[in-house]
Image (tube, grey):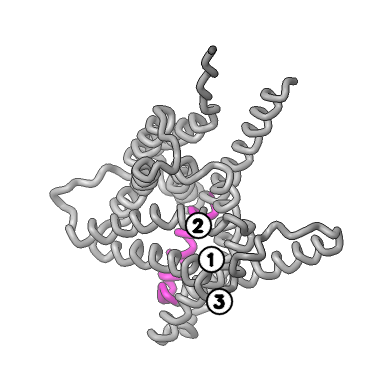
Amino acid sequence: MSEGGAARHAASHAALRGTLAVVVSACCFGSISPLTVIATERGMALESIQTWRYVTSAVLVLVYGWWVRRSARAASTPSTSDGALPPWYHPRVLLVAGGGQAVVATLALAALQWLPAATASFLFYTYPAWVTVIAAVRGLERIDRTRVLALLLALGGIGAMVGAPSTASLSPVGVAVILAGALVYALYIPVLNGLQRGRSPLDVTKAMCVGGTVCFAVWSLGSGALLDLPDPVALGASMLQGALAGGAFFGFLAGLRVLGNVRTAITSTVEPFWTTMLGVVLLGQPIGVGTVVGGAAIMSAVLLLQRPVALPSPRLS
């Protein structure tokens, strides 16, 4: 194999691994919603659920980070972090990484006061479009026809699954809040990518989990809901969310480093498809034509993004 062929093979292999990491991350995130329903139906406040979720994520990620660091020292592996950068536990890094998570989650939950869950889901998952627009305007990534087509397939798939919202029945306040959440998330993804320059995905994951814990702990302490635990099932559902979220953060960041902002955002749209399938398997919800068509469109978008980007041919002098 030539040197150019080997490089293309390595890039293709890295992109595949990155895509799988993002898909697994999306499935973990998509598994959190049913657990939230279980906890809230038993009387647990949302801020308390989020606090225990992030506490669990932080503990697991910190223990895993300690184990990785100990193994690296035993193997005499040099650190890949840049000593000139502030560490992941610096207050500014915690505020950016954890605060972004808290803002997105708060906006998404607040919108449910005015919008049905399906409508809110459709509007929130317009964030890949915002990511694409931001990347194009700032000139961060090349937006070719393949990515535009993949974006349209993914958004069309989500629309087929949850139903396109009817503008006549939507609350303007709810639409504004959920679109604000989508826009904040679209802005947050490049910020996370920037935090990874000189830092490992694991360190950024630590900052997200610990920073999110601080934000939600302040909220739940202020409302008095932190220790208001209705029963062990509700607490267990919240802590299981934390275990899933820790792996989801790490997989998302690992894929983001390889795929970039646009491809990662579009690939993440497998999450509502996974959530729908969980509803079919675990809750006995019927599967409709929209689910099948939407899932096929989303899978097509993910597979389309695996096509290598064609490089311009060198000009002959």
The quadrant the N terminus occupies is top right
Disc 3 residue type (three-letter): Pro
Disc 1 residue type (three-letter): Met
Please tell me which residue is depicted at 54% across the width and 48% down the height of the picture: 256
Q: Which residue is mark 2?
A: 192
64, 192: nearer the viewer:
192
Identify whether 50 is placed above or below 219.
above
Magenta stretch bounds: 27-47
Q: Which residue is mark 1?
A: 208
**Horizontal relation, residue 56 to residue 281: left or right:** right
Q: Position of residue 240 (x, y in %)?
A: 57, 65
Comparing marks 3 and 2, which lies closer to the viewer? 2
- Give the SS element for disc 3: helix
State which tag comes first along the sequence, 3 or 2: 2
Q: Quadrant of residue 67?
A: bottom right
**Horizontal relation, residue 22 to residue 269: left or right:** right
284, 270: nearer the viewer:
270
Q: CB atoms at circles 2 and 1 under 8 Å apart?
A: yes
